[in-house]
Image: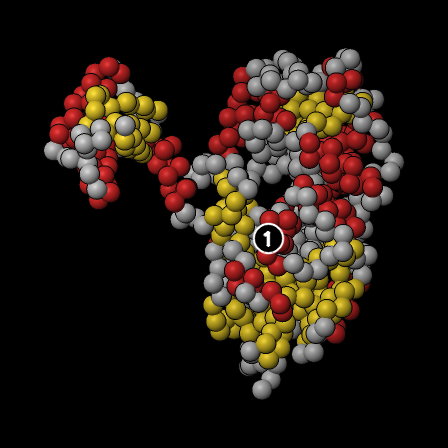
């Protein structure tokens, strides 16, 4: 029987975020696996109390004895964010370039896990041998340091997994795309390319960080009061641009926000940002006049706890903003964040602060490939098969059409859980389905999306809470008035609601004698129904109801 070469995305296909991809090779009953990336996505307001969501790794956890390692392309949260949460279930080697490895180590440190023996640092353009896979890191450009494509060589052919990328002729920080090696790989033959689909709808090229720098310098030169720039902390080239522009216009710069400091420190440790001015402490920056300071802060997406939101609400301890100042949002407005961002923009404008964003000035370029970038990659690599990932369904379907335009013989459309057989066979195709899904990080516990704790919390947030405590005498009779407590129910007249509810409870209680456990359960069920019905009639809400029976 022939060995098989398989590809299976568990996250990041049909959605943007929480990337997790598997490659398998071997006999049908005994594949060896590698995992590429292990990311998160961020929860929205519809999931109260949950911040992070990551792919359900159940399929590979069952096969963890055959998992040779986790190979990481770059350090964005949607590629490494789940690593410290899921690694304890997998206990395998992790491979990453120096900057990425540094940020991974910090994640494990927070979890108090010693990862020293399992985290292997790969040099830029370096190689990793995980028999039967030979993996070569290829330097690309993106909106973070050290983004890599992976050439995954197997006994039956090689795969190019692009990770996140674009073609940036002037990335400013870090190396340029290793175009020469990509062309060589294309000449040697590529069985399949697993490719980023984020910007497939956008014509032209993604643009260069150098162009943003020139534009930012022009904008900042005309501003004469306090300047606050907010951007993704992970975009070190944009960080360097802020430093460069501040120096050019004769200002000091101060970093605000935990992740801004973390990324700055990591970049310096890895030998980047060598020729920039030294940032000054935000507490010290208060002593500088408005026209002599630039702040670079987190919170470019309007995150409630981000530095930018706290500054705009006048609750930040170190950064004060006033009429005539300017805020530059040097980042993309991520779909889904419009509401909170526009609210933040409106608040600033209302307070007489100038707001500059990608909507009215050139202050941002994407880190993902537009159609012209994709075209270049296709021409270099000449893949026989393209599998679009890293996109919603609409992006991936558009990418399939694009691949056909580019004369790729076998584009394959996938979604999370699809198992694609790349070899053997006449052509690559989806031939099986792996269990896939998502897990929510609730506090520090992983839960399923349909877990009871989440259902209860949604119910509480929508309907409020009602608690009834009833005393029962040794003879099984109800003793005195019940004790009521409620929260989050829109009650106009508290006394009227309480008396009415007590009456309902007493009517039900009179019909019960509470001797056995079964009678207790029956009384609790009857009271729950009556209380929720009464509340619904009075307030339109059916609260989450808890009944306590206390024997005295």
Residue 41, above or below 318: below
The image position of residue 169, as x and y in percent, is 77, 50
- In terms of secondary structure, where does tag 1 sit? helix
Residue 111 falls left or right of residue 440: right
Q: Residue at x 53, y 54 (%)?
A: 55
- Which image quadrant is residue 510 in? top left
Q: Residue at x 66, y 37 (%)?
A: 232
Residue nearest the observer in this picture, 215 or 146: 146
- Which image quadrant is residue 299 in? top right
| Residue 415 visible, this orientation | no
Q: Residue at x 68, y 29 (%)?
A: 257
Q: Quadrant of the C terminus?
A: top left
The image position of residue 412, as x and y in percent, is 53, 68
| Residue 520 visible, this orientation | yes
Residue nearest the observer in this picture, 400 or 483: 483
Residue 67 falls left or right of residue 210: left
- Which image quadrant is residue 151 in? bottom right
List the residue tagged with mark 1. 86
Q: Residue at x 62, y 54 (%)?
A: 88
Q: Quadrant of the N terminus?
A: bottom right
Residue 338 falls left or right of residue 468: right
């Amino acid at each position: 029987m022939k060995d098989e070469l398989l590809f299976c995305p568990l996250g990041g296909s049909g959605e943007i975020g929480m990337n997790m991809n598997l490659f398998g090779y071997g006999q049908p009953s005994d594949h060896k696996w590698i995992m590429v990336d292990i990311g998160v996505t961020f929860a929205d307001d519809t999931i109260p109390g949950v911040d992070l969501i990551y792919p359900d790794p159940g399929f590979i956890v069952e096969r963890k004895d055959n998992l040779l390692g986790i190979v990481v392309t770059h350090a964005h949260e949607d590629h490494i964010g789940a690593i410290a949460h899921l690694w304890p279930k997998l206990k395998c080697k992790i491979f990453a370039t120096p900057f990425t490895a540094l940020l991974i180590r910090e994640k494990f440190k927070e979890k108090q896990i010693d990862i020293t023996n399992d985290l292997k640092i790969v040099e830029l353009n370096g190689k990793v041998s995980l028999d039967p896979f030979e993996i070569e890191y290829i330097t690309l450009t993106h909106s973070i340091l050290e983004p890599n494509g992976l050439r995954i060589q197997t006994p039956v052919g090689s795969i190019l997994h692009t990770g996140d990328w674009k073609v940036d002729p002037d990335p400013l920080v870090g190396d340029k795309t290793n175009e020469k090696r990509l062309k060589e790989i294309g000449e040697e033959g590529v069985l399949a390319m697993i490719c980023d689909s984020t910007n497939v709808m956008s014509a032209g090229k993604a643009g260069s960080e150098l162009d943003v720098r020139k534009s930012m310098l022009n904008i900042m030169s005309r501003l004469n009061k306090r300047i606050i720039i907010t951007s993704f902390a992970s975009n070190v080239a944009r960080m360097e641009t802020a430093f460069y522009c501040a120096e050019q216009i004769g200002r000091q710069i101060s970093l605000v926000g935990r992740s801004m400091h973390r990324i700055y420190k990591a970049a310096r440790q890895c030998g980047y940002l060598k020729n920039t001015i030294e940032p000054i402490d935000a507490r010290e920056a208060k002593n500088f006049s408005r026209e002599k300071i630039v702040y670079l802060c987190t919170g470019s997406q309007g995150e409630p706890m981000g530095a930018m939101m706290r500054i705009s609400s006048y609750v930040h301890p170190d950064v004060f903003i006033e009429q005539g100042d300017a805020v530059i949002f040097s980042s993309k407005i991520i779909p889904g964040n419009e509401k909170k961002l526009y609210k933040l923009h409106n608040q600033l404008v209302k307070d007489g602060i100038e707001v500059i964003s990608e909507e009215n000035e050139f202050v941002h370029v994407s880190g993902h490939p537009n159609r012209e970038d994709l075209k270049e990659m296709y021409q270099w690599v000449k893949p026989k098969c393209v599998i679009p990932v890293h996109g919603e369904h609409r992006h991936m379907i558009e990418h399939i059409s694009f691949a056909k335009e580019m004369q790729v013989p076998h584009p394959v459309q996938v979604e999370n859980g699809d198992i694609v057989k790349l070899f053997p066979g006449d052509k690559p195709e989806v031939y099986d389905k792996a269990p896939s899904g998502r897990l929510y990080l609730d506090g520090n516990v992983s839960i399923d999306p349909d877990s009871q704790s989440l259902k209860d919390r949604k119910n509480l947030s929508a309907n409020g809470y009602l608690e009834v405590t009833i005393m029962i005498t040794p003879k099984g009779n109800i003793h005195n008035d019940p004790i009521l407590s409620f929260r989050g129910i829109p009650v106009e007249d508290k006394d009227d609601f309480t008396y009415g509810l007590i009456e309902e409870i007493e009517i039900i209680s009179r019909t019960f004698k509470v001797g056995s456990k079964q009678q207790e359960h029956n009384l609790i069920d009857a009271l729950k129904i009556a209380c929720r019905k009464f509340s619904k009639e009075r307030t339109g809400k059916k609260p989450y109801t808890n009944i306590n029976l206390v024997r005295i």
